[in-house]
Image (spheres, rainbow, N blue to C red):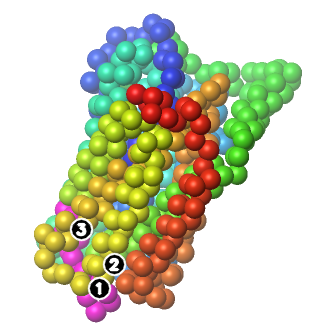
Amino acid sequence: MSDPVPLPAGVRGAEAQSRARNPWAWIPTLYLAEGLPYVVVMTVSVIMYKRFGISNTEIALYTSWLYLPWVVKPLWSPVVDILGTRRAWIWAMQLLIGAGLAGVALALPGPQFFRWTLVFFWLLAFNSATHDIAADGFYILAQTEKQQALFVGVRSLFYRIATIAGQGLLVVLAGTLETRTGNMRLAWSITLGILAGLFLLFGLWHRFVLPRSAADRPSGARGELGGAEAVQLDRAFLATFGSFFQRPRMAVIVLFLLLYRLGEAQLVKMVAPFLLDARDKGGLALTTAQVGVVYGTVGVAALTVGGIAGGWLIARHGLGAWLWPMLFAIHLPDAVFIYLAHAQPTSLTLIQLCIAVEQFGYGFGFTAYLMYMIYLARGQHQTAHYAICTGFMAMGMMFPGMWSGWLQDHIGYPRFFTWVILATVPSFLITLALPLDATFGRKSAA
């Protein structure tokens, strides 16, 4: 359910000389490599652990901690600028992501698999978050403004393909191998081992294919700076963060960033367990492969359509005109899970329809949240300010997700999904107080 982090509007790309390289040779593979590890860490890990019999309480708690690297990402994003080129960071992180995936695959057959796979998933999350910083920065520096605009749709498309491949095809492959081998751990070990090999290829490919941009150079390692320059850099770093919090009514804005997805943050951790759990436990008893199809392909397709529709409407009428309709759209469709939990239908088509409705609403409503972050980031330090916004976004998913499994284990799926609807109320209340000045009006995004 996650989207690629869009770049703040108005960022100026480097017009500097760069070695000629067709963007089609590296942009599609770069954003496949950006999307896949996020999906594996946030979604596929939940499905995998559920298949291994881990409780919902433990799944939600420990996999929610994996959001932490994305929460604190703004704190170390300047390091990527200061040390080395973004190009080098990209292919190095891809090789480390591959190593992390290989670590998970090798740890799965062992007796302490849960502990060690979590360690490797956390390292994988850290490397993935660092890769996001480098990849999005490189996208700006290695292209002209015209190229950036031309390929923004391409990068989003291939991030979506990565989401479908991760939540859909990867899970279907694991489910197929489960059936053929009769060994769930072996099936998932093979699946993640294949993905590890793919990231080895990604790293080697981008080591040679990424263009060498004159603008992509380190801003100066700390050790190369004199005392006065280092102090000045520290002050500039702190001033950048401080300026974000000097806005009027900042407390309301932060609460909006944290609470907009309060219900969804709890729902997302329990969807896959609900689909996989046996009927006597309140679930729908789908197979791993069926979850891959329903949640990873049909669901992601509906999510994509909803996001496209939301972006088109905001572009025509502005965020101010669509904020409230999108707020309702992201929350009200969650009620389909109340029906599914009570009725426990056996029709796969009906389940697919319900998932598609919820995912379309999520994609449509999440657009407003992303656009608000983009507007907040506009100004002198827009890249850093947008990174701060995404940190709050990840925090808003991390903490509510931690306790969702414990709550579901104690009250059951029907009451849990009813609670999810009740948990959306704070987002409506905080939106009533949200500052929407003239820049958010009808012409702001036109």
Which circle's residue, 3 or 1, is located before the other in the chain?
A: 1
Q: Nearer the viewer, residue 423 or 191?
A: 423
Judging by the rendered image, the residue that carries numbered circle 2 is 338
Measured as percent of width and height from the top left, residue 98 is found at 39, 47
As for residue 97 lying within the magenta part, the answer is no
Is there a contact, CB below 8 Å, between mark 1 and mark 2? yes
Task: Look at the image and give the residue range highlighted in magenta.
Answer: 279-296
**SS for tag 3?**
helix
Circle 2 — which element?
Answer: helix
| Tag 3 residue | 354
Judged from this view, the residue extending furthest toward the right is 228
Where, by quadrant of the figure, is residue 150 drawn? top left
The residue that mark 1 highlights is 342
Residue located 52% across and 36% down the image: 440
Residue 322 image-quadrant placement: top left
Picture quarter with the N terminus: bottom left
Sequence-wise, which precedes: disc 2 or disc 3?
2
Amino acid on which the number 1 mark rests in the picture: His
